[in-house]
Image (cartoon, rainbow, N blue to C red):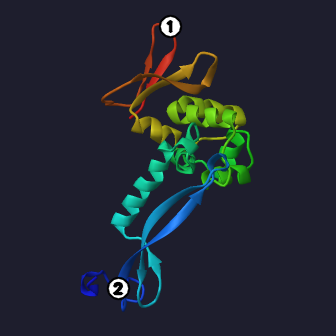
Amino acid sequence: MNTTELPRCHVCRKGQLLPSTTTREFKPRGQTVRVELLASVCNHCGKETIRAKQHDENLKRLADRKHRDEYKGLLLGEEILALRHRYGLTQQAAAKIFGKTNITFSRYEHEVTYPDESTTMLLRLAIEMPEALRRLADQAGEPVPLWQERCEDRRMTLHPLPSAPAQLRVVEQMDVLTSVGSIEAPDGAWMQEAA
């Protein structure tokens, strides 16, 4: 390989980045799953780095393991982490919402251990139906910091549940929302439109 075609090291600025790989191991259901990930190593300082194209390919390789038999029915750590980040939850808050400990939730995200079947069902429900996450959070007494922002992201119309006025549920998806305001419905209930 001609080293003049290789990118320069951004750390030492003397060496060039040579392609390399690392292997990450996961143990779903006690079976070892190895994923080969791309990286680059400086031939001068030895610093390992991951370039943008390598990062994108690594994400694809990590996501592909979901289709392996060893993962059937399991959530990936990345999916659990994405749920938590999407709504601005700390590990402590997420653990309280789903009835687990901080350490356990961290282990789920890093795939040191995997959620049991009932926790997997709750997490999957929260991923697929955000209203379920909100209801669990309300019952646990935990705020969902980015709830309103995510409702606006999804362009939802919200109104209170009949049994619990402080809780919100989705009543319809709207393509375009124009103004913020309250509208009184014929039955005396109210609707709030997200901006």
Query: How far is disc 1 from disc 2 in space, using C-alphas?
Result: 71 Å
SS at mark 1? loop
**In x, y percent, where is residue 46?**
47, 86
Graded by Cα atoms within 10 Å as few (under 14), some (14 to 19) or many (20 or more), the crowding at tag 2 reads many
Within the image, what quadrant is residue 110 found in? bottom right
Q: Quick one: quadrant of the C terminus?
A: top left
Q: Report x, y in % for residue 123.
A: 60, 37
**Residue 22 rendering spot, x and y as whole percentages:** 50, 69
- Frontmost residue, 74 versus 12: 74
Measured as percent of width and height from the top left, residue 15 is found at: 37, 89
Find disc 1 in the rendering and name its residue.
Answer: 187
Q: Quadrant of residue 164?
A: top right
Q: In the rendered image, which residue does mark 2 sit on?
A: 16
Say which quarter of the image contains residue 125.
Answer: top right
Disc 1 versus disc 2: nearer the observer: 2
Determine whether label 1 and label 2 are within 8 Å by CB.
Answer: no
